[in-house]
């Protein structure tokens, strides 16, 4: 049967500061009612000035390590999924490696926006299956609130900050763990959702900043439609690859971008709402962090039992999408 990647610990971190829909009402032409009915969100978290993607990731990583009973120095690899790295380089993974004291681990970042955590799980799983690494830390961390146009009501209301992490361990001949991952990209739709930030496509001039070129841009409605179609497709692929049907799935932990997207995906794949884990009302869209934060909460709430079949699915900028099927 060979080697399998088992999730042996989870952890998450959310900044303390809460930004509610009512707070947004005083900043923009919007309403709590519109945001709740169109997105399912009530509030989101905002990082403090001294927090970064790495500081949030470090906290989530420490909690996951503790949960797994693994020491940082035992880690072989650190993968950090983020679209908002601390800097262009060094990687956020290297910063986290230093902070937690993972002296023997190699670290690198994975850029796949909201699908980043599933991409990182997929990469980690390949390293474990080949026998190259045994203990891997996978972090999803994003600090979007520093890159939002707070005058654009169609995008700024959607995002929040946070981090989540899991520890993967190589298990020999077990039937538990990651059964499959399927990941996809289509760069032709890259213009639907992007964040130039301080990237090399433009100089970070005063003019660029004044015209908000460095901030997140999104065509929400177009993204919405592709997201539903692609997530339904990639769930079907995960099930078929493992000889499973949707009624075998015990819990779906989807990317939390919009409650209407989550509902449409649930209906599209034929999974009843009680099997879908949702926490979007509290945190909004934390990009690469939504799935590991939700997974950590699902575990801590006792929603996952041994032998449960767990399905993860995401869609995001790139465009990128993917699914993972896990025997818990
Ligand atoms: O993480 C993965 C990537 N991201 C996503 O998957 C996000 C996908 N998109 C979405 O979640 C939705 O498209 C939004 C929530 C962003 C927008 O919802 P929508 O149903 O697609 O609305 P819309 O963009 O078609 O806009 C409908 C109306 C517009 O007014 P008019 O032109 O009909 O008069 C907007 O101006 O809603 C208006 N609107 C708002 N009204 C109050 C847009 N944002 C707001 C707002 N408050 N915050």
Image (spheres, rainbow, N blue to C red):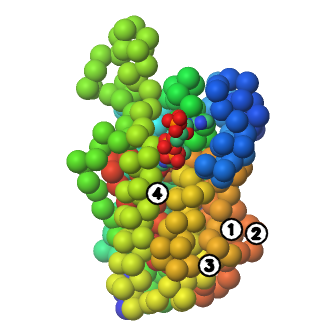
Q: Secondary structure at mark 4?
A: helix
Name the N-terminal-most of marks 2 and 3. 3
Q: Residue at x 35, y 78 (%)?
A: 237
Residue pointed to by mark 2: 301
Residue pointed to by mark 3: 272
Cβ of mark 3 under 8 Å from ligand 1: the answer is: no
Label 4 with label 1: CB-CB less than 8 Å: no
Residue 245: percent from left, percent from top: 46, 89
Name the N-terminal-most of marks 2 and 4. 4
* Labels in figure, total: 4
Name the N-terminal-most of marks 4 and 1. 4
Picture quadrant where residue 7 is located: bottom right
Q: CA distance from mark 3 to mark 4?
A: 24 Å
In the image, 61: left or right of 131?
right
Residue pointed to by mark 1: 298
Depth check, mark 1 against mark 3: the one in front is: 3
Q: Secondary structure at mark 3?
A: loop
Label 2 with label 4: CB-CB less than 8 Å: no
**Label 2 neighbourhood size at 10 Å, few (<14), some (14-19), many (20+)?**
few
Residue pointed to by mark 4: 117
**Label 1 neighbourhood size at 10 Å, few (<14), some (14-19), many (20+)?**
some
In the image, 239: left or right of 66?
left
Depth check, mark 3 against mark 4: the one in front is: 3
Name the N-terminal-most of marks 1 and 3. 3
Q: Secondary structure at mark 1?
A: helix
In the image, 49: left or right of 271?
right
């Amino acid at each position: 049967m060979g080697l399998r990647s088992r999730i042996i610990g989870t952890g998450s971190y959310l900044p303390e500061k809460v930004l509610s829909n009512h707070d947004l009402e005083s900043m923009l032409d919007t309403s709590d009612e519109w945001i709740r009915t169109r997105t399912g969100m009530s509030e989101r978290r905002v990082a403090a000035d001294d927090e970064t993607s790495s500081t949030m990731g470090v906290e989530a990583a420490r909690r996951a390590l503790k949960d797994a009973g693994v020491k940082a120095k035992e880690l072989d690899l650190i993968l950090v999924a983020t679209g908002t790295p601390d800097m262009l380089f060094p990687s956020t993974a290297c910063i986290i490696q230093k902070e937690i004291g993972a002296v023997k681990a190699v670290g690198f970042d994975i850029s796949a926006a909201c699908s980043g955590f599933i991409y990182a799980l997929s990469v980690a799983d390949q390293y474990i299956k080949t026998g190259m690494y045994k203990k891997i830390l996978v972090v999803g961390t994003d600090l979007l609130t520093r890159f939002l146009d707070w005058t654009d009501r169609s995008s700024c209301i959607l995002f929040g900050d946070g981090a989540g992490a899991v520890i993967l361990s190589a298990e020999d001949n077990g039937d538990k763990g990651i059964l499959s991952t399927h990941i996809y990209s289509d760069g032709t739709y890259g213009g639907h959702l992007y964040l130039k930030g301080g990237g090399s496509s433009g100089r970070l001039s005063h003019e660029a900043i004044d015209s908000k070129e460095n901030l997140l841009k999104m065509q929400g409605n177009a993204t919405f439609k592709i997201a539903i179609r692609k997530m339904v497709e990639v769930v079907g692929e995960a099930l078929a690859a493992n000889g499973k049907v949707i009624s075998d799935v015990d819990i779906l932990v989807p990317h939390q971008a919009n409650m209407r997207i989550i509902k449409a995906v649930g209906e599209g794949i034929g999974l009843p709402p009680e099997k879908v884990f949702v926490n979007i009302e509290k945190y909004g869209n934390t990009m690469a962090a939504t799935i590991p934060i939700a997974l950590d909460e699902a575990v801590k709430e006792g929603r996952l039992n041994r032998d449960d079949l767990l399905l993860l699915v995401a869609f995001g900028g790139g465009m990128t999408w993917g699914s993972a099927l896990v025997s818990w």
